[in-house]
Amino acid sequence: MPSISGSFSGKIIKEFGISPKDQANHDLSIAEVNGIQKSPDALWDNSEITYWGITDLLDGKGSQTGYFDNIHRDQGRDWGTFEGRVTTTPAGLIVEGKYTFIGGDSTYEGLTGGGTFKILAKSETEVEATWTGSYELAKAQSNKS
């Protein structure tokens, strides 16, 4: 499986939050984030990522789960899921976790793999992310048979 890495600066496009009254300092939110990927791997470089994260925080710590969608320069797409642990720091909200590819079309049909990521929400509208992992395209998998 080829290794991949990359980063992106993203903008929080939409966000909605509530504070349930079940416990003190409990916050739930959902957000849509959009950005352009930078990667040494030509397949992922300049792809447009959109992700939707659901965050559950209690006293500034908790979890985030969600879905992502990459639109590649060659017009193909891939998508998947992610989950991570969230901590609040003076620098901003940090999410660290794992992602998994679950599908794709065109060149990315049958894509498998995944990896790890780290996101820093620098403000209410800006995020910075880095990621590493590995992937295999279905075409490469069929060539092994």
Image: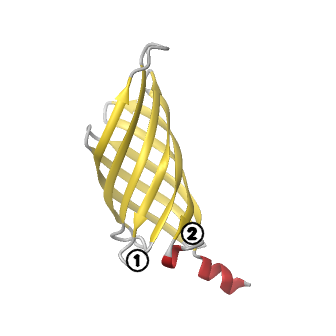
Name the quarter where the C terminus is drawn: bottom right
Residue 144 at x, y percent in the picture: 70, 84
User: Would you place residue 49 above or below residue 59 in this image?
Assistant: below
Q: At x 42% / y 64%, what residue is drawn?
A: 70
Residue 81 at x, y percent in the picture: 53, 52
- Considering depth in this image, is 124 or 66 the residue closer to the camera? 66
Mark 2 or mark 1: name the one nearer the start of the chain.
Answer: 1
Amino acid marked by disc 2? Tyr
Residue 132 at x, y percent in the picture: 49, 60
User: Would you place residue 39 above or below residue 142 in this image?
Assistant: above
Q: Which residue is mark 1?
A: 42
Residue 121 at x, y percent in the picture: 33, 41
User: Would you place residue 69 above or below residue 142 in this image?
Assistant: above
In this picture, residue 111 sits left or right of residue 120: right
Which type of secondary structure does the marked residue at label 1 adopt? loop
Alpha-carbon span between mark 2 and mark 1 = 13 Å
Name the quarter where the N terminus is drawn: bottom right
User: What crowding class fits label 2: few (fewer than 14 Cα within 10 Å), some (14-19), or many (20 or more)?
Assistant: some
- Considering depth in this image, is 61 or 74 the residue closer to the camera? 74
Q: At x 32% / y 54%, what residue is drawn?
A: 34
User: Would you place residue 9 above or below residue 61 in this image?
Assistant: below
Residue 68 position by quadrant? bottom left
Amino acid marked by disc 1? Ala
User: What crowding class fits label 1: few (fewer than 14 Cα within 10 Å), some (14-19), or many (20 or more)?
Assistant: few
Q: At x 44% / y 19%, what residue is drawn?
A: 20
Any mark on residue 135, and which?
A: 2
